[in-house]
Every structure is written in structure tokens, then in C-alpha cells.
Amino acid sequence: MSEKIESLIANVQKAEASLHHELENRNAKIRKKLSRMDDELKRRQMLLKTNVFRYVARANILFVITAPVIYSLIVPFALLDLMVSVYQHICFRVYKIPLVRRSEYFSYDRTRLNYLNIIEKINCAYCSYGNGTIAYAREVASRTERFWCPIKHARQIEGTHKYYPFFEEYGDGENYKPNLSRHRASLTQSTQEELR
């Protein structure tokens, strides 16, 4: 990998770390504000809640019709969640890859918002579960790819994971085999450092 690419990757990682830090600070302020939330504020938020019957009556009919299609994905999401968990608990232990902490990918805090009605809370919980499941599965899959096949694709692809920039170049057979053990060792080391 060229120095320029390494420098760009380092800059992106620094920017991501800075963004993460700023978002954590903002979230800490929000949590502090919520913990001090007085009864008056809670009462005002309750006034913002749309009555369930009014919510359904005013809903776009196409939204109502497509809701079962959206919610039908709960079965594949749950199956994916289960299978990824079983897979990593069996295989990652064999390969000595640190387990992905499933709990870090799921948050249901929006269900505690007083201004959401029960339907909105269920929708938020469902979206949290679906996106959390995909993020969790992606991390398990990316660690698997880093262990077994750390080779870049021949063409640029969208949405690569955080390990991808460090993969071997496509077609570089001379460096692939010698560097495979290094990739595996760095996976074990870097993910253990993340767990600290």
C-alpha cells in the first residue's frame, strides 16, 4: 500500500475517532439532561405524543399496507442473529478470533421517549433490532474475511468494512501467503485491544 493511501486511511481513522468522541460528548450531555429531566418536561413531552387511534387514522394507507412486508423481515433478522451468534461462538473459538460483543450493536433507548406512542416505540425498537443485527453480522463477517481472505477486490466496491483497507492487493500472490499469518495475528491482537 502506498504512503499516500496509508496517510489518507490514517486521516480518515483520526476523523472517525474525533467524530466518535464528539458524538459521545454530545450523547453524554443529552443523558445528563435527561437524568435531570423534571416532571414538567416529561409532562410537556407527553403532550407531544400522538394518540394511537389518531396516529392510525391519519396514517398514509400505503404505509399501513406495506407494514406487514416490513415486519415480515423479523423472521430473517432473528434467524440471522441466531445463526451469526452460533457461528461465531463455535468458529471464532477455534480460530482464536475474539468474539464480537453483540450487546454493543443494539440499543433500545428510543422506546423510553415520552413523546412516542406505542406504535412509534415498536417501530423504533424494530428498526434498532434490524440495523443492530446487520451491524453485528457485518462485524462478524468482516473478522471472518480478515482471517480467511484478506485480499482486496479487483474493482472498487461500496461500503467496505474497517479492516478492508489493510487487505492485500488483488493479484499480489507473492505477498499474500507470507502476510496471511500477519493478518491473522493482527486481527487477534487488535480486536483484543478493542475489548480493553
Image (cartoon, grey):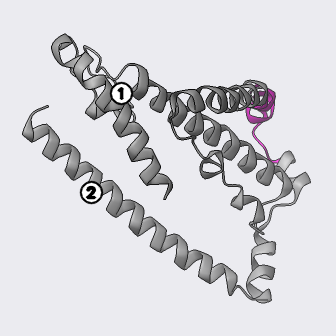
- Residue at left offset 42%, top offset 53%: 193
**Closer to the camera in the image, 61 or 16:** 16
Q: Which residues are magenta?
A: 58-71
Q: Residue 136: percent from the left, percent from the top?
A: 58, 38
10 Å crowding of disc 2: few (<14), some (14-19), many (20+):
few
Residue kind at label 1, given as amino acid type: Glu
Is 1 positioned to the left or the right of 56 in the image? left
**Closer to the camera in the image, 2 or 157:** 2
Q: Provide the major secondary structure of the magenta segment.
A: helix
For residue 158, the mark is 1
Residue kind at label 2, given as amino acid type: Lys
The residue mark sitting in front, 2 or 1, is: 2
Q: Residue 163: percent from the left, percent from the top?
A: 35, 36
Q: Is residue 196 magenta?
A: no
Report how many numbered discs are placed on residues in the image.
2
**Closer to the camera in the image, 8 or 192:** 192
Can you name the residue that lies furthest to the right here?
53
Q: Who comes first in sequence, dot 2 or dot 1?
A: 2
Q: Residue 153: percent from the left, percent from the top?
A: 29, 17
Is 163 positioned to the left or the right of 28 in the image? left
Q: Which residue is mark 2?
A: 14
Choose top left, top right, bottom left or bottom right for residue 169: top left
- Residue at left offset 70%, top offset 61%: 109
Query: CB atoms at circles 2 and 1 under 8 Å apart?
Result: no
Q: Is residue 66 magenta?
A: yes
